[in-house]
Image: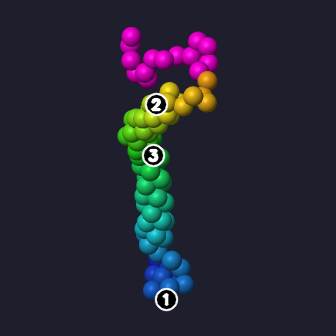
């Protein structure tokens, strides 16, 4: 019987179990590498956002300061009662 199985394997009629396992493991490795890449991208997105946030806040603050200066020089803009006049980030 062993001779018959070997003859069938050599004729490529019955796949070698080792080759089937190698093929299966290679497919699994490819899938795992894809999952790892997606996980790393998920981790990098918040890190990238954290590095951009201070710059965005600074730009918004500068725009608010510019708009307040423009509003102070225009008579048609009315200040609301009790409006805060503290500068963003000040502790006074």
Q: Which residue is mark 2?
A: 69
Q: How is the image coloured?
A: rainbow
Assess whether mark 1 and mark 3 are in contact (beta carbons under 8 angstroms). no
How far separated are the C-alphas under marks 2 and 1?
87 Å
Q: What residue do we see at 43% from left, 38% from top?
A: 59
CA gap between label 3 and label 2 equals 36 Å
In the depicted view, which residue is nearer to us: 33 or 74?
A: 74
Q: Which residue is mark 3?
A: 45
**Part of the protein shown in magenta:** 79-92
**Residue 3 position (above or below residue 91):** below
Q: Position of residue 12 (x, y in %)?
A: 50, 85
Judged by depth in the image, the label closer to the viewer, 3 or 2, is 2
Residue at image x 46%, y 30%? 69
Residue 20 shown in magenta: no
Q: Are marks 3 and 2 in contact (CB under 8 Å)?
A: no
Point 48% across, 17% down: residue: 85
Residue topped by disc 1: 11
Query: Which element type, helix, strand or loop, lies under badge 2?
Result: helix
At which x and y percent is residue 71?
53, 30
Mark earlier in primary sequence (3, 2): 3
- Which quarter of the figure has residue 86? top left
């Amino acid at each position: 019987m062993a001779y018959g199985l070997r003859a069938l394997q050599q004729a490529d009629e019955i796949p070698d179990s080792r080759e089937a396992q190698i093929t299966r493991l290679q497919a699994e490795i490819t899938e795992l590498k894809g999952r790892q890449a997606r996980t790393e991208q998920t981790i990098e997105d918040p890190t990238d956002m954290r590095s951009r946030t201070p710059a965005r806040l600074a730009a918004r603050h500068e725009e608010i300061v510019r708009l307040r200066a423009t509003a102070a020089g225009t008579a048609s803009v009315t200040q609301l009662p009790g409006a805060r006049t503290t500068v963003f980030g000040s502790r006074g």
